[in-house]
Amino acid sequence: MTATVIDGKAFAARVRADLAAHVVRLREVHGLVPGLAVVLVGEDPASQVYVRNKGSQTTEAGMASFEHKLPVDTPEADLLALIHNLNADPAVHGILVQLPLPGHIDTDLVINAIDPAKDVDGFHILNVGLLGTGQKAMVPCTPLGCLMMLRDHLGSLSGLNAVVVGRSNIVGKPMAQLLLGDSCTVTIAHSRTRDLAGVCARADILVAAVGRPEMITADMVKPGATVIDVGINRVERDGRARLVGDVDFASVAAVAGAITPVPGGVGPMTIACLLANTLTACCRANGLPEPDGLTA
């Protein structure tokens, strides 16, 4: 068996095109332009690249982009004051504070200072609680992207056995909640799971989000399963740096029914879903119907 490769880059491009069409209608019919504010504290190179990509894709989708770049020694109080102002700004529908923050800043305090309705990362404790109780929430972007790809590839997920390897607040836990919401039977596995290989091998849907290079091997995968690889790990191979996932792609692709590659799988969907959340927040703020297919 050779697995179908789920092309996240192509799927994300379709999502962004759909978003752009919604944005045009919002502007023409309602005079609204969704706005995303991104806050970067410090000069971390990876964060700078990510913020730059977010800004360019935001404007390409026809949305307004507001970037706030602050020095690494910015006082916590100043960052909180900026968030307060963005919360009150009607032109801003989504607020994202790029993580990680410098050590002198309380990350949880900052995240929970964001208006939950503008929390397009889905990290605010209120959104976490709403998602966990099956209510309307802002959903973390990476799990939302995974869910959208699974729905696109499999159609209905109802009744499927899903295993999520990883229990982080950013991916593992919200991914499990989203799969439950689509009526999967869900197991969360992690480093302390007994017989991890056996647990994974029972999954119709296997989501790997542990941050360990190529941890999931072919013997851990049910033949025909759909494998979503969230991991992005930099490794040295033959004297060169390479990006690999949490899944041993070559061996697992010979067993699985479908698999996402790294790079080019889940990654491109994260920014696409950030834009989707911004559009959703704009619609909710103005009492308009949410866009079909772009929410959980």
Image (tube, grey):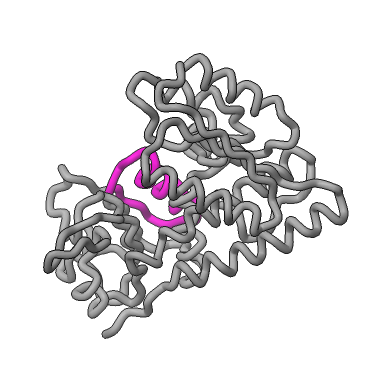
Compare residues 115 and 242 and report the one nearer the observer. 242
Give the residue at x 17% y 46%. Answer: 193
Residue 202 seen anywhere in this rendered image of the structure:
yes
User: Image check: 168 left or right of 132?
Assistant: left
Q: How many marks?
A: 0
Residue 180 belongs to the span the image colors magenta: yes
Give the residue at x 43% y 49%. Answer: 49
Residue 163 seen anywhere in this rendered image of the structure:
no
Image coordinates of residue 59 in percent, x first then y, are: 65, 53
Give the residue at x 41% y 21%. Answer: 73
Image coordinates of residue 12 in percent, x first then y, are: 53, 65
Boundaries of the magenta span: 166-188
Image coordinates of residue 109 in percent, x first then y, are: 46, 20
Residue 103's image quarter? top left
Query: Is residue 110 placed above or below 5 in the rendered structure?
Result: above
Query: Is residue 137 placed above or below 271 in the rendered structure?
Result: above
Q: Residue furthest bottom?
A: 1
Compare residues 229 and 85 and report the one nearer the observer. 85
Image coordinates of residue 20 in percent, x first then y, are: 69, 61
